[in-house]
Amino acid sequence: MTGTRTWKRITTADGSWTLEHPEHGEACHSRYGAWMEARERYCIPCELNELAGERDEVRLLDVGTGLGLNIAAALEVAAAQNTPLRVVTLERSRDVLLTAIEIGLADPSLATEDSSNAAGELHRVVLSTIADALGSEGTEVPFSGRPDLGSLRLLLGDARDTLPALAPDQKFDVCFLDPFSHRKEPELWSPPFLAEVAGRLAEDGRLSTYSASVRVRAGLIAAGLTVGLGPRVAKKAAGTVAQRGGTLPVFEPRIEKRVLRAAEELRNATNSPDQPTSST
Ligand SMILES: C[S@@+](CC[C@H](N)C(=O)[O-])C[C@H]1O[C@@H](n2cnc3c(N)ncnc32)[C@H](O)[C@@H]1O
């Protein structure tokens, strides 16, 4: 214990717990259900189940490790298909990881409906693996006690530095884009970072985020992706999915127009020699 960690555990409506940021108080997951959000906001729209059924392995880029719950949900899906998951996860706060490990190894996050406890066990595996990863300086480690499930590589630091430092040809089949809100922590929603994330998607890769912001959707388009409507999860607004080309669920025409106009403005700003290219 450092005595400085004050991430606070909160229980969400599906019975699973998440953590609240010590300063701005935003929660790592929807208060309607942390496990529900991990499954329905990330795994389902990324079509992880279908992908795991077709591939020998699935490569996941997890932006914002937090308490590792989105990774646990992905493991649940991949493990059901006996497909190993190779995760690269990006986190700048050692404290959130240490808090999650301290709480979750003893009492993993579990939705009330998951009476079998298998999901909670997967969260424990993730946290135990993150503990291993913290001791091994950015190297890939097998899932703790379950190497059959795949591996995890934790990049500790600001994702704006750690992601570009990956090998240029390292691509991902799936990306969970889950920073705090633009209002609280805008950095990972900036067009340059979105372009970095977009560049990491494999040709047929798929990204999902809870953000429904015109600016974020425009940033992903300006980075060369096709964007579409993500699912509504509980009472939350529909999020955003993105991929390289193809078709995705469409926005209302009014929204579509605003997104395309904003993407055009971003492209013009990026191409203009008079404009900064790193605006948020
Ligand atoms: C909404 S929480 C993520 C929850 C997580 N996906 C999970 O399943 O538990 C956002 C996380 O992003 C991290 N974060 C915020 N800014 C970051 C940055 N610039 N680089 C890396 N991580 C960052 C925060 O510390 C926080 O843990």
Image: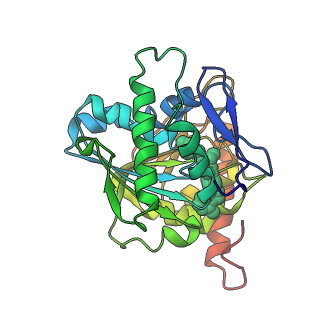
Question: Is 104 positioned to the left or the right of 169 in the image?
Answer: right
Say which residue appears at 72% left-offset and 65% top-offset: 280
* Residue 83 pos. (x, y %): 24, 39
Question: Is 136 positioned to the left or the right of 31 in the image?
Answer: left
Residue sitting at the far left: 56
Say which residue appears at 70% left-offset and 46% top-offset: 7
Say which residue appears at 60% left-offset and 20% top-offset: 14
Q: Residue 140 appears in which quarter of the rendering? A: bottom left
Above/below status of 239 relative to 280: above
Above/below status of 130 relative to 18: below
Residue sitting at the far bottom: 273
Say which residue appears at 37% left-offset and 50% top-offset: 205
Q: Nearer the viewer, residue 180 or 127?
A: 127
Q: Is residue 271 visible?
A: yes
* Residue 80 pos. (x, y %): 28, 28
* Residue 99 pos. (x, y %): 61, 47
* Residue 110 pos. (x, y %): 52, 25
Q: Is residue 46 visible?
A: no
Q: Nearer the viewer, residue 159 or 245?
A: 159
Could you tell me how many numbered marks the image carries? 0
Q: Nearer the viewer, residue 192 or 245?
A: 192
Above/below status of 164 relative to 156: below
Q: How is the image coloured?
A: rainbow
